[in-house]
Image: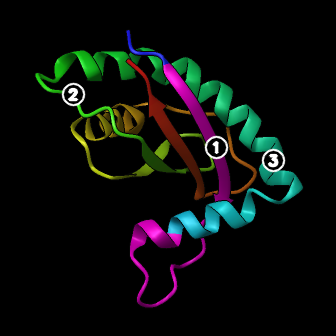
Amino acid sequence: MIPIAALLFFAAAAPAPPAGASAFEAARKIAVANAKTAQGRKYQSVFAKAFSESQAGELGRCVERQSAPDLSPFEALAEIAANGSVEAVLVRPETNVAVCLRDSIRRHAFPRPPRPRYWTSTTLRLSH
């Protein structure tokens, strides 16, 4: 299995994206800003633990499934519903490993966020 070298997490609520901004950049900007709040920092640590537990094995399987896995760092944004289900997942860049993990994240539930439609951001750096 490929170890996860570093995971960085940010959590945020998701107001409407600003006009002209891509969906990814708008969600990321909100996540970074809200991660600086006390509520965001608290959820960040809870989400990070749940993400690591549910996705580390999936990440390894995603790497193994690729004939030429792209191990470039990538960021995954997930919109978490009030009940912890995943409403949307965006990844950038869309490498073969990132797209595979995106599909796995969509199938998992996470701890209930402080508010409905809560965006989280995870940066993954893979090592050989």
Asked if residue 78 is positioned above or below residue 127 in the image, the reply reads below
Q: CA distance from mark 1 to mark 3?
A: 9 Å
Label 1 environment density (alpha carbons within 10 Å; few <14, some 14–19, many ≥20): many
Q: Find numbered disc 3 in the image and state the secondary structure of the residue it sits on.
A: helix
Q: CA distance from mark 1 to mark 2?
A: 23 Å
Asked if residue 27 is positioned above or below residue 82 in the image, the reply reads below
Badge 3 amino acid: Arg
Badge 1 amino acid: Phe
Badge 2 amino acid: Pro
- Image coordinates for residue 38, horizontal then vertical, percent: 88, 54
Task: Report whether residue 13 is seen.
Answer: no
The residue that appears at 81% across and 47% down in the rendered structure is 41
- The earlier-in-sequence mark between 2 and 3 is 3
Residue reaching furthest bottom? Answer: 19
Look at mark 3 in the image and give the residue it sits on: 41
Assign the N terminus to one quadrant of the image: top left
Are discs 1 and 2 less than 8 Å apart at CB?
no
Residue reaching furthest right? Answer: 38
Q: Find numbered disc 2 in the image and state the secondary structure of the residue it sits on.
A: loop
Task: Report whether residue 109 is seen.
Answer: yes
Q: CA distance from mark 2 to mark 3?
A: 32 Å
Label 3 environment density (alpha carbons within 10 Å; few <14, some 14–19, many ≥20): some
Q: Is residue 14 left or right of residue 38?
A: left
Determine which of the numbered discs, if any, sits on residue 69 in the image.
2
Q: Which residues are magenta?
A: 4-26
Q: Is residue 15 left or right of residue 64?
A: right
